[in-house]
Image: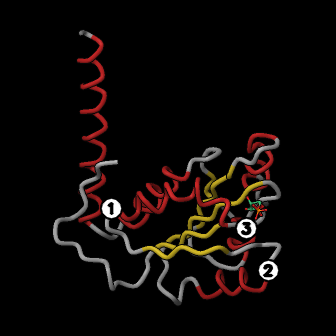
Amino acid sequence: MPVPSEPGRDVSDARPLVGVVMGSDSDFTVMSDAVQVLRDFGVPVEVQVVSAHRTPERMIAYGRTARERGLKAIVAGAGGAAHLPGMIAAVTTVPVIGVPVPLAKLDGLDSLLSIVQMPGGIPVATVSIGGAKNAGLLAVSILSTSDDGLAAALDRYRDSLVELVDQKNEDLQT
Ligand code: RP5
């Protein structure tokens, strides 16, 4: 995705602003789309496997320390019994964006329903099945509310989508 990040925005040593977590390294084929978007926009990101079931204490520590560590959004992906996004949201008020990861069985419907049906009071912003790219973009949007450079980069990205459609329309004429 050719995204215009701010020229000269060096994030190599910056403190992560977004955490991308997933229940297993097997989720990374999907979750890498979120990481890619965030990096394209020049957002410092940390990436970790944190399992709600295999490493529950670590998951709770991750959520509890998220705000003090400077995270402004968390993108959490999991498949099957996908409890990670909801459980992280239960222990932090940093916005959590849930990504239902599709597994071989049930095509990700199980993951979607596990993530989206949160009880009132503990929100998770759930994207589509496999929608890690949009999760990354939503995290950028959250950051852009207090970062004019990111807001401008998002505008340029949206312009690039219009250009893409124009190009496709042109191609249809040939
Ligand atoms: C979930 O179980 C993970 O998020 C992953 O989607 C799924 C399978 O994990 P692995 O058996 O591939 O490690 O908790």
Q: Which residue is mark 3?
A: 84
Name which residue type carries label 1: Phe
| Mark nearer the N terminus (3 vs 1) | 1
The local secondary structure at tag 1 comes to loop
Name which residue type carries label 2: Pro
Quarter holding residue 118: bottom right
**Is ligand 1 less than 8 Å from the beta carbon at label 1?**
no
| Mark nearer the N terminus (2 vs 1) | 1
Quadrant of the snapshot with the C terminus: top left
Report, in whole angstroms, how far the alpha carbon at label 3 lies from the one at label 1: 25 Å
Quarter holding residue 48: bottom right
**Is ligand 1 less than 8 Å from the beta carbon at label 3?**
yes
Label 1 crowd bin: few (<14), some (14–19), many (20+), radius 10 Å: many
| Mark nearer the N terminus (2 vs 3) | 2
Point out residue 63 in the picture as x, y percentages from the top left corner. Answer: 65, 80
Q: Residue at x 32, y 80 (%)?
A: 12
Q: Residue most toward the left?
A: 7
Q: Nearer the viewer, residue 6 or 122?
A: 6
Report, in whole angstroms, how far the alpha carbon at label 2 lies from the one at label 1: 31 Å
Q: Nearer the viewer, residue 112 or 54?
A: 54
Q: Nearer the viewer, residue 67 or 33?
A: 33
Q: Residue at x 51, y 88 (%)?
A: 69
Point out residue 148 in the picture as x, y percentages from the top left corner. Answer: 25, 65
Point out residue 150 in the picture as x, y percentages from the top left corner. Answer: 29, 63
